[in-house]
Image (spheres, rainbow, N blue to C red):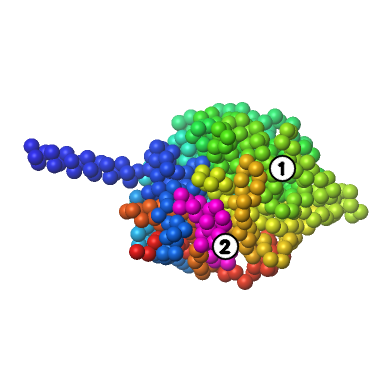
Amino acid sequence: MRLRLSSLMITLAVASLSAQAVVTDQMIDNDAKTPNDVLSWGLGSQGQRYSPLKQINASTIGRLTPVWSFSFGGEKQRGQESQPVIHNGKMFVTGSYSRIFALDTTTGKKLWKYEHRLPDGIMPCCDVINRGAALYDNLVIFMTLDAQIVALNQDTGEVEWKEKIDNYADGYSASAAPLIAGGLLLTGVSGGEFGVVGRVEARNPKTGAMVWSRPTVEGHMGYKYDKEGNKTENGVSGTPGKSWPGDLWKTGGAATWLGGTFDAKTGLAYFGAGNPSPWNSHLRKGDNLFSCSTIAIDIKTGQIKWHYQNTPNDGWDFDGVNEFITFDMDGKRVGGKADRNGFFYVNDASTGQLVNAFPFVNKVTWATGIDLKTGRPNFVPENRPGDPTASADGKKGASVFSAPSFLGGKNQMPMAYSPDTKLFYVPANEWGMEIWNEPITYKKGGAYLGAGFTIKTLNDDYIGALRAIDPKTGKIVWEAKNNAPLWGGVLTTGGNLVFWGTPEGYLQAADAKTGKIVWKFQTGSGVVAPPITWQDKGEQYVAVVSGWGGAVPLWGGDVAKKVNYLEQGGSVWVFKLMK
């Protein structure tokens, strides 16, 4: 009897351990509340990037010390924008050129590496980066620069399934971290500078089979898919012909290149849509839905529940892709978004109704403000780049100086929200640009801009500034200025700390209430990725990927020249408190 009982207990223990090794829907739903792992891009599908861990705080952070560092190796460096995910003693971290590594979280030992074979002719606009992976069941899933999704076995790195999103030769690519919500794998596409058609796709995460697709350019049909892969129409996005002239909607851009967030209380996934194509706004009179918008999608139906357009008829490449982070304010479920266009928006998370909008950068030239009643910007017409057909030679429209630059008041680097301080921590940049329009026609696979530009600095002493912002009042509570533009994300914790990285190579931490910098560490290359934190065996860890690159050195004009002394790299650093 004792032998049978012992055998039963061993069996149950093994089953329990096995169950813990598999990532479930419930675990993903609770990711923000369970600090022993990091299962989602954003430390929870809401994307708040807040951890309740407080072992590392202002009193103890002086003992925060590197535990290990892992180099991505080889000659393939460039920009490293990845957020690691943590589960079952393993870190899964992506690198440039569509690579992913599995590492032992305690020692940094490499367990396996998968290097996706990229074809010649890929066309990523803004460096060969990748922003991270998703975990589901025993799979780690990430997207590649040739527009594919790859699911690997977490233990072995073997490919379990692989699916093509679209044709890379037409300008499609993918670099965002996938989102798991309601048992679905949700992904977007990149390629707005090549006239692609943006969309959000839902798949079965275990097989890669399509469930539904929702285009983010008005006039395109959405689809549902049965278990055999047969598709049926699921309604057109918007109203055909309403906000686009002629056939421009067929190559309308609105790429969903940063991925999305999900709120279980509303049942909605929130994806930002990028710039309309081409950049020359005089060719496409109208609002050009759903470009430069936050789009809320019912994940059960694949239908757009609501949208809010941050920049109608965008003429400055103010992509609306930035993350929409849900939180509670005055008893309501709302969401915050720091847009490329320089304004911070608060919308009702269930309806999209605008609650508040205010500038979070010091210089905005394209609009004087946002009308809280209509939700529309108050444009400054003379600060829109000129129509080239009105110029003497018909080849170059009137140039204007615009702020922010098209690289944005905030770009891809994710902000964080603390339910403790009720503040957002926004990595902002102060810069402008000379911009003008040019004639352009669409050619499949070719750049589709119709504009020229040069990025300019606005201040001698700083470009970047981490800003603590009150979403209710619009007040900037504190800021920490930085010489180079900020391009990495933010983490905030229950220890009253905010962590972020700088292009100069520092991972640093500040008091979340005052902004006083209390710790910094030199990682050896620029940090353009968001930090994470987790707990293992009673000890709190912090990690960040280091490796300078991204859009700034490629598109940055005068700013790129100012920071051309920064060196590339490729590594991940892990820290804990020294005993």
Residue to which mark 1 is pinned: 311
Local packing at callout 2 (Cα closer than 10 Å; few below 14, some 14-19, many 20+) is many
- Give the residue type at disc 2: Thr
Question: What span is in magenta?
Answer: 491-518
- The x and y percentages for residue 210 are 50, 36
Query: Residue at point 46% right, 35% down?
Result: 182
Locate the N terminus by quadrant. top left
Q: Nearer the viewer, mark 1 or mark 2?
A: 2
Amino acid type, mark 1: Thr
Task: Give above or below for 520 relative to 423.
Answer: below
* Residue 331 located left or right of residue 236: left
Image coordinates of residue 260 in percent, x first then y, are 55, 42
Q: Residue 437: give its label.
A: none
The image shows residue 175, relative to residue 482, as above or below, that is: above
**Which residue is denoted by mark 2 in the rendering?**
502
Residue drawn at (37%, 57%) of the image: 105
Secondary structure, mark 1, is loop
